[in-house]
Image: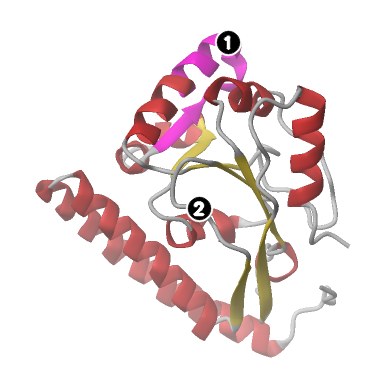
Amino acid sequence: MAVTDRASLGDVLRSLVFYVVFYLGTAGYVLGSLAALAFGRRAFITAVDGWSGFHRLCARYLLGIRVVLEGELPTEGALIALKHESFFEAIDLPHMLHRPAVIAKAELLRIPLWGLAGSTYGLIGVERDQGAKALRTMLTAARKLVAEGRVLAIFPEGTRVRHGTRPELQSGFAGLYKLLAMPVVPVAVNSGPLYHRRWKRPGTITLRVGETIPTGLPRDEIEARVRDAINALNP
């Protein structure tokens, strides 16, 4: 996907409208989700799913960004490993997947109110500096959510990366794969050129589902296969 660095007037105007509509709408969804907590966790999760769907609509009709899914995403029983190029896929996860449990940086759970909301939805915090202890805590939380029928999602590169780059996967990914004993479904995403910028661009974001990778592979092989698959849309 080739785009120039220079934003057009249309890009600027579309982005400004998007920021106003999406963030004002987000404020409404935050209040609605907090109210939904009074009716239980399921009602809260439904409200968050609605917010993610609202974001997809804003991207489509305000930014001119279409989303194309190539392949089929599982609804349970798998670890979904995604490329992470922008906030698009992070916000889109509850719409993209069926009520995913998301493995993410523990710092997010320490944000006032947001952290409570994240943990209630199914965000699993990773304390990167605590080694084996962090892995055990994460596994306990992940297994509980898997038992509820939730699908797990992770960005194995650990953070957003520039489109066209192929960083090594975070070291904890292979350990998580081994201990969870779940197949991995890799997903390539090419959102960076359109969405990871102040003035967003119209175009198509592709989500390409790779071949399911079975359990029990050695570390070098699982990391190589996932890394290749999530970078399938890189130039």
| Image coordinates for residue 218, horizontal then vertical, percent | 76, 23
Q: Position of residue 198 (x, y in %)?
A: 65, 67
SS assignment at label 2 = loop
Residue highlighted by disc 1: 132
Looking at the picture, which amino acid does disc 1 mark?
Answer: Ala
Answer with left or right where residue 222 lies relative to residue 35: right
Residue 168, visible in the rendered structure: no
**Membership of 128 in magenta stretch:** yes
Q: Residue at x 83, y 59 (%)?
A: 234
Q: x, y percentage for residue 43?
A: 19, 53
Q: Nearer the viewer, mark 1 or mark 2?
A: 2
First reached walking from the N terminus: tag 1 or tag 2: 2
Amino acid bearing label 2: Pro
Horizontally, is 116 left or right of 220 in the view?
left
Residue matched to label 2: 74
Q: Secondary structure at mark 1?
A: helix
Q: Residue at x 27, y 57 (%)?
A: 46
Q: Could you tell me residue 50's position as x and y percent?
A: 33, 65
Q: Main secondary structure of the magenta part?
A: helix
Quadrant (top left, top right, bottom left, bottom right) of the C terminus: bottom right
Residues drawn in magenta: 123-138
In the picture shown, does residue 165 fall above or below 132? below
Report the Cα–Cα distance between label 1 and label 2: 29 Å
Q: Quadrant of residue 179?
A: top right
Q: Residue at x 68, y 47 (%)?
A: 160
In this rendering, is residue 85 above or below 106? below
**Drawn side of residue 205 relative to residue 73, left or right:** right
